[in-house]
Amino acid sequence: MEVGSQAGRDAWQNMSDAFNSECPAREVLEHITSRWAMLILAALGETPRRFSQLHTTVGGISEKMLSQTLRTLVRDGLVVRTVEPTTPPRVSYELTPLGRGLTKSLEQFLSWIRQHTIDVVTAQRRHDQQHQ
């Protein structure tokens, strides 16, 4: 027989198995690993930013996609949206403590990409030449 905290922990263990297609962790994984979410989170890792600053920083993202992704990240508790009562209202976005924890891991991931992009592109070209 399981006791309180162990039973609760086991229940959450089953709810955070991203390999299970019915698991809520799958949705979290989709949200944070999307191309735009990763770039937005990395951009916010440095400092709070306004919408227009994020749009400039994250090259190639449409305003619609930026807005959608920010809404998702706010809903997920990774980003906080702050509206200053000015005319016009000044809106800024910054990481929550939960989001800052995630971006620590994300920084390592992006660092790996920066260090190994040449290796991956070289492998892609070699593969493409061998399979033409």
Image (cartoon, grey):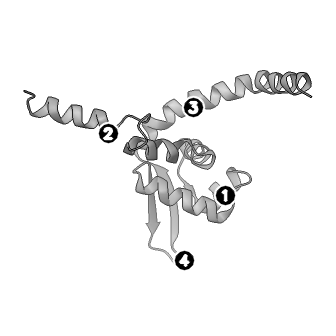
Q: Which residue is mark 2?
A: 15
Q: Write down the quadrant of residue 15 in the picture.
A: top left
Label placed on residue 69: none
Q: Which residue is mark 4?
A: 88
**Mark 4 vs 2: CB contact within 8 A:** no
Image coordinates of residue 131 in percent, x first then y, are 88, 25
Tell which circle, 3 or 4, labels the residue nearer the N-terminal end: 4
- The foreground one among 129 and 28 is 129
Please state which of the two labelled residues, at mark 3 or mark 4, is closer to the viewer: 3
Image coordinates of residue 52 in percent, x first then y, are 64, 62
**Amino acid at circle 4:** Pro
| Crowding at mark 2 (Cα within 10 Å: few <14, some 14-19, many 20+) | some
Q: Which residue is mark 1?
A: 55
Image coordinates of residue 79 in percent, x first then y, are 45, 51
Tell which circle, 1 or 4, labels the residue nearer the N-terminal end: 1
Element assignment for label 1: helix
User: Mark 1 to mark 4: distance in Å?
Assistant: 19 Å
| Residue at x 55%, y 61% (from the top left corner) | 68
